[in-house]
Image (tube, grey):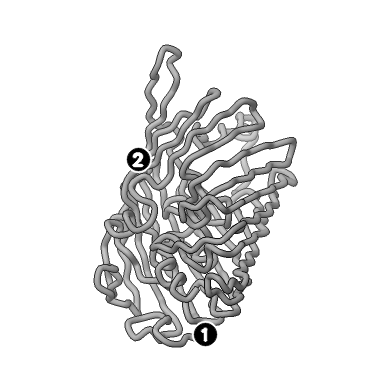
């Protein structure tokens, strides 16, 4: 989510031949990998493989310092022009002005992410970074300590990225600039404690947290993944409210925070291809005390990325979601689908990428549709993002 705009509304409703000499030459070394894995990045953008670090303390422990400074422009039809939303036919804004500080080895580790950011998502008004940051997860959206007593076991505590879904929270982390329809239904950042354990090809994570950033620790989230081989991974995710939460806010949708959500995610990586289809189901049970009637959604998406070379990549996403009880990522609609195309060029730490997205909804009613009259059934949006990952 995130989900600032969607929370506010959804909560309201719910080669050629080589010569012999060339063949005898040794193969080129593989691309350098960054020594840090947080923030996670799905590509096609890649993290700085040689981030800045300082040796601190008597043991000379490395503390890495990185960040993302990016800006975006957008043009769209059916803009809401709502006061303060920055959702106009055209706009320019800061999408990330963030710094990452982390220690990634030893028994005690930590991660701190701080700065401003915007959270563009399909079908919802664009909220500028200066409003999205205080209205969602604050100037420190993620920060946690990590205790690592063994190579295959760790415990994390703090403001954690969610285990749910196949897209991350911030623009630079994902295949596309704007997050999709399924992302609008998912938690993004939760305060809590999480344990991680791996054995062979199996990985498990279990978390007690506050769900959709409610500050009420009554959610349990779990993830189990199986690395089938070097090209294929299968993951199962389940998360839900174990109690009852009467609180709602700009980052905490009332209905969704009193429900549960499930994913099945498959990822295939083969040469230049990354293909990741996933299924999602969410459910909000009836609760007479909270005035909630039963609602649910069912959806699926396919995310694809293809690398033409080390610098130029093309990503795309197609998704569909339908709902009962008017609980769906686009308020007032019964079903929706989207298509997104994102070509990306990256040279060292600099990148530029463009994006076209189309969203279609049906069953809109009342003032919960797209556009200034709340009744449009589709929206097209063009975006351009550029910046540096350091």
Above or below 73: residue 272: above
x and y percentages locating residue 164 in the rendered image: 58, 55
Q: Identify the secondary structure beneath mark 2.
A: strand
Residue drawn at (71%, 45%), measured in percent from left and top?
Answer: 227
Distance from the alpha carbon under mark 1 to that under mark 2: 41 Å
Residue drawn at (39%, 34%), measured in percent from left and top?
Answer: 101
For residue 98, what is the image quadrant?
top left
- The circle on residue 99 is 2
Residue drawn at (45%, 84%), measured in percent from left and top?
Answer: 377
x and y percentages locating residue 336 in the rendered image: 53, 77
Above or below 284: residue 233: above
x and y percentages locating residue 7 in the rendered image: 43, 66
Placement of the C terminus among the 4 image quadrants = top left
Above or below 253: residue 235: above
Task: Specify whether 369 is left or right of 291.
Answer: left
Q: Identify the secondary structure beneath mark 1.
A: strand
For residue 241, what is the image quadrant?
bottom right
Q: Which residue does the numbered mark 1 point to in the structure image?
A: 362
For residue 62, what is the image quadrant?
top left
- The circle on residue 196 is none
Residue 69 in view (yes/no): no
Q: Residues within 10 Å of mark 2 (few under 14, many from 20)?
A: some
Above or below 134: residue 283: below
Give the mark count. Answer: 2
Residue 364 in view (yes/no): yes
């Amino acid at each position: 989510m995130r989900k600032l705009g969607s929370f506010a509304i959804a909560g309201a409703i719910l080669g050629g031949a080589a010569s012999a000499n060339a063949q005898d030459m040794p193969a080129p070394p593989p691309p350098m990998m960054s020594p840090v894995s947080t923030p996670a990045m799905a590509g096609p953008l890649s993290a700085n493989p040689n981030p800045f670090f300082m040796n601190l303390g008597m043991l000379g422990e490395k503390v890495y310092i990185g960040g993302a400074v990016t800006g975006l422009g957008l043009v769209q039809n059916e803009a809401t022009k709502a006061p303060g939303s920055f959702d106009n036919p055209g706009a320019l804004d800061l999408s990330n002005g963030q710094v990452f500080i982390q220690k990634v080895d030893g028994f005690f580790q930590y991660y701190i992410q701080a700065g401003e950011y915007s959270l563009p998502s399909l079908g919802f008004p664009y909220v500028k970074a200066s409003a999205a940051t205080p209205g969602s997860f604050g100037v420190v959206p993620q920060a946690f300590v990590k205790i690592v007593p063994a190579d295959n076991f760790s415990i994390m505590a703090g403001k954690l990225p969610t285990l749910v879904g196949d897209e991350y929270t911030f623009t630079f982390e994902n295949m596309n600039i704007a997050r999709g329809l399924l992302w609008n239904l998912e938690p993004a950042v939760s305060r809590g404690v999480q344990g991680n354990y791996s054995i062979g090809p199996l990985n498990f994570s279990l978390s007690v947290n506050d769900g959709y950033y409610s500050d009420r620790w009554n959610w349990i989230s779990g993830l189990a993944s199986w690395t089938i081989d070097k090209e294929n991974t299968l993951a199962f995710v389940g998360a839900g409210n174990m109690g009852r939460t009467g609180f709602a806010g700009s980052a905490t949708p009332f209905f969704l925070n009193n429900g549960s959500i499930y994913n099945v995610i498959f990822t295939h990586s083969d040469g230049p291809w990354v293909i990741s289809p996933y299924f999602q189901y969410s459910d909000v049970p009836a609760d007479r005390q909270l005035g909630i009637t039963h609602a649910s959604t069912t959806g699926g998406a396919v995310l694809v990325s293809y690398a033409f070379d080390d610098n130029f990549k093309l990503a795309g996403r197609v998704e569909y979601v339908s709902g009962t009880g008017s609980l769906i990522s686009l308020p007032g609609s019964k079903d929706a689908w989207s298509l997104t195309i994102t070509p990306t060029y990256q040279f060292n730490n600099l990148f530029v990428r463009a994006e076209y997205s189309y969203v279609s909804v049906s069953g809109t009613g009342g003032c919960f549709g797209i556009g200034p009259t709340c009744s449009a059934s589709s929206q097209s949006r063009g975006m351009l993002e550029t910046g540096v990952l350091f």
